[in-house]
Image (tube, rainbow, N blue to C red):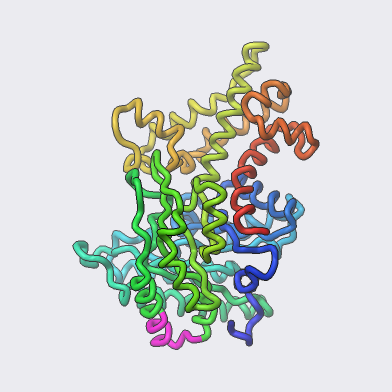
């Protein structure tokens, strides 16, 4: 660690793993307000920290698909933390897949300047964990061969240099700020899950892992980034986990052992696991124990949110049989929005229309998450919650459709209020990650 700078809390936490209650940290990769509230509430209840990460295509200098810049996202997190009674300093902000991802259809000379602006904007907004991702081919790269580690590392070092320059500017207005930590790598899974269902996934070979690390070390040294290299905390690898439309490849500790054994040679470095969504809690814990100490999850949490909304709508449907009131029509509105625009799901869901209709509602890929912010969909969700609060939720129906929340209401842990039930349902999925990363 660069001792001339204030310690980065993520690096401090990772360096202390094994000597206290923390075995690692999970990253909540979502910009959905209900999901982020669930993550903050669980962290507050467990007296721990929470790491929330924004993805490059979700939040960027142009607004991304959420309409938020990095500064907007940081303000969004600060607002939710304040509203949830969570100290700001316990809500860590990270950037995921920062690089030319959004501009990969452009040649390097056009894509990289945009990526540099992206990384600078994250650092200038106070993000303290930066995942540099240059693993994707650009328009003028050879499409027939694997992108060389040297190219990936060179571009990554270029982005790191931009981040370091941005941090120097940031400290002028924020003296005492913690310098960002970096996550690097070349075998980076596709953001949001695989395009096709798979039975197994090849684990990164130890020799490839070592080659990647050495390529990045050399590229950082060539740019004079020795101090920044001391803040590289993790390497993204493929430990053998993935999910897709209707499949989940579970972690196999024995198969991953040759890879995880590499960490014994690199004190202070951990692996970052992407696509850990839907892993059983015991497998998540094994991953953290084996040094895959940063567990990233996103679609599984919005899957849980959609699941909770569907359950609440079933309660609404039962109430409508007892007394008339304007129904929310949430599920029908979500389907309307997805049918109207195939952009976010067309490449993922295949087969007959009945199969695609099922996938739009229930797929593990959870492409529905892109449509939750659509104004009509968001309004339908708000109407659903308001209807239930106004009409009242019978405990028998709560037990039928959200049994875990029924038990927590009866124990006095959460109020019988639609939004709290929904957030708590998402929190139940987060509990698996807290089990994995906290003693």
> Residue at (62%, 22%) from the top-left corner?
316
227 w.r.t. 77: above or below: below
Residue 225 is covered by the magenta coloring: yes
Tell me, yes or no, if residue 26 can be seen here. Answer: yes
* In the image: residue 114, left or right of residue 272: left
Q: Residue at x 66, y 48 (%)?
A: 37
What type of secondary structure mainly makes up the magenta span? helix
Query: Residue 137 location, x and y as percent?
Result: 29, 64
Please state which of residues 263 and 114 is positioned toward the viewer in this rendering. 263
Q: Is residue 313 left or right of residue 117?
A: right
The answer to which image quadrant residue 16 occupies is: bottom right
Residue 373, x across and y down, in percent: 52, 41
Residue ranking furthest to the right: 412
Instruction: Note whether residue 166 is visible.
Output: no
Count of all numbered marks drawn on residues in the image: 0
Q: Residue at x 56, y 57 (%)?
A: 27
The picture places residue 339, in percent across and down from the top left corner, at: 38, 32
Location of residue 286 by image quarter: bottom right
Image vertical order of residue 408 relative to residue 291, above or below: above
Question: Residue 422 colored magenta?
Answer: no
Q: Determine whether 423 is above or below 289 in the image.
A: above
Quadrant (top left/top right/bottom left/bottom right) for the N terminus: bottom right
Which quadrant holds the C terminus?
Answer: bottom right
- Name the one closer to the observer, 236 or 288: 288
Residue at 67% x, 22% y is 397
Residue 192, x across and y down, in percent: 43, 50
- Identity of the residue furthest to the left in this view: 144
Point out the stretch of residues depicted in magenta: 217-226
């Amino acid at each position: 660690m660069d001792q001339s700078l204030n310690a980065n809390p993520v690096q401090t936490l990772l360096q202390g793993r094994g000597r206290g209650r923390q075995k690692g940290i999970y990253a909540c990769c979502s910009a959905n307000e209900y999901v982020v509230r669930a993550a903050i509430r669980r962290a507050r209840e467990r007296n721990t920290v929470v790491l929330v990460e924004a993805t490059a295509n979700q939040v960027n200098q142009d607004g991304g698909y959420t309409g938020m810049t990095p500064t907007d996202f940081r303000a969004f997190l600060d607002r939710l933390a304040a509203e949830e009674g969570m100290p700001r300093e316990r809500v860590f902000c990270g950037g995921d897949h920062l690089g030319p991802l959004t501009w990969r259809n452009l040649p390097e000379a056009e894509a990289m300047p945009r990526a540099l602006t992206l990384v600078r904007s994250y650092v200038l907004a106070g993000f303290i964990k930066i995942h540099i991702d240059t693993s994707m081919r650009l328009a003028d790269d050879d499409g027939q061969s694997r992108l060389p580690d040297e190219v990936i590392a060179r571009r990554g070092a270029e982005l790191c240099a931009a981040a370091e320059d941005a941090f120097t500017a940031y400290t002028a207005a924020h003296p005492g700020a913690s310098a960002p930590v970096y996550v690097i790598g070349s075998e980076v899974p596709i953001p949001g899950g695989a395009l096709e269902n798979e039975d197994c996934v090849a684990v990164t070979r130890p020799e490839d892992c070592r080659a990647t690390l050495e390529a990045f070390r050399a590229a950082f040294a060539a740019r004079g980034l020795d101090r920044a290299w001391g803040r590289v905390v993790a390497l993204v690898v493929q430990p053998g986990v993935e999910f897709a439309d209707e499949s989940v490849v579970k972690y196999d500790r024995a198969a991953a052992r040759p890879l995880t054994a590499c960490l014994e040679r690199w004190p202070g470095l951990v692996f970052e696991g992407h696509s850990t969504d839907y892993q059983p809690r015991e497998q998540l814990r094994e991953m953290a124990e084996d040094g895959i100490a940063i567990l990233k999850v996103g679609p599984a949490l919005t899957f849980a949110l959609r699941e909770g909304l569907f359950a609440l709508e079933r309660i609404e449907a039962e109430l409508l049989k007892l007394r008339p009131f304007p129904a929310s029509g949430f599920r029908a509105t979500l389907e309307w929005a997805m049918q109207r625009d195939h952009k976010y799901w067309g490449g993922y869901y295949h087969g007959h229309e009945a199969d695609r209709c099922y996938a739009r509602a229930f797929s593990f890929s959870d492409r529905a998450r892109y449509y939750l912010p659509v104004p009509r969909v968001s309004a339908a969700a708000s109407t659903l919650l308001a209807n239930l609060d106004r009409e009242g939720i019978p405990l028998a129906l709560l037990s039928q459709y959200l049994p875990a929340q029924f038990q927590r209401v009866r124990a006095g842990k959460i109020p019988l209020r639609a939004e709290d039930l929904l957030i708590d349902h998402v929190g139940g999925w987060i509990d698996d990650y807290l089990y994995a990363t906290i003693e």
